[in-house]
Image (tube, grey):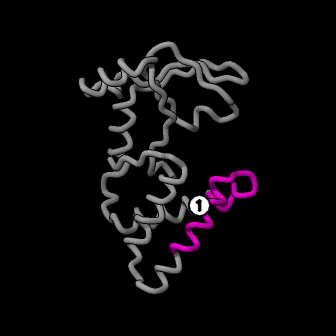
Amino acid sequence: MRRRALVVYASPAFHTLDELYNHTEAQAIVENTSFVKVERLHNHKQWNYYQPGTNGVAHSEPEFIEDIPFYSMIEQAGEFSEGNENHSDNLHFLHKMTLEACHEIQEHNPIARYYLRIHGRLMRIQEIYEVEETIDYVAFNLFCNVAKLKWLVI
């Protein structure tokens, strides 16, 4: 995404539903979650942590990873996108990159194959209605739903 997106693996740093509900009511889910940038997990199959935040150990080859706090990551991502105000172009780029990534991994990834199949159906709607920005939005939103991702706009 050429630094246009912050992609992190997020995992709760608590164990019970009671804790989940308490953190939800206190609006403290982020503060009680472990975050690691996806790129930091390259060549690793596991992420272990003992407390919320951005520190932990990546495995296959153990490697301690320490990063800036999650809110600082968001701040940096927001700063990087300043001056990049053309929302239609950004949305089109996001749709295009998602599609390219799915094409690259479809041979070994059933989620990518499923998304591409549904995406093909969606593109027939575009041919009829020619609503490019809406199609870009719906296509990326569809990807998030298929891949069970949460898309948050900064």
Q: Which residue is drawn at 68% across and 30% down?
A: 45
Coordinates of residue 15 in the picture (x, y in percent):
46, 17
Coordinates of residue 95 in the picture (x, y in percent):
49, 63
Q: Mark 1 points at which residue?
A: 115
Question: What are the residue bounds of the magenta stretch?
Answer: 102-122
Q: Residue at x 55, y 68 (%)?
A: 119
21 or 100: nearer the viewer: 21
Which residue ends up furthest to the left in the rendered image?
26
What's under tag 1, amino acid-wise?
A: Tyr
59 or 110: nearer the viewer: 110
Q: Residue at x 66, y 60 (%)?
A: 113
Above/below status of 123 relative to 65: below
Q: What element carries label 1?
A: helix
Which residue ends up furthest to the front in the rendered image?
17
Q: In this view, does 148 lie to the left or right of 86?
A: right
Coordinates of residue 94 in the picture (x, y in percent):
47, 60
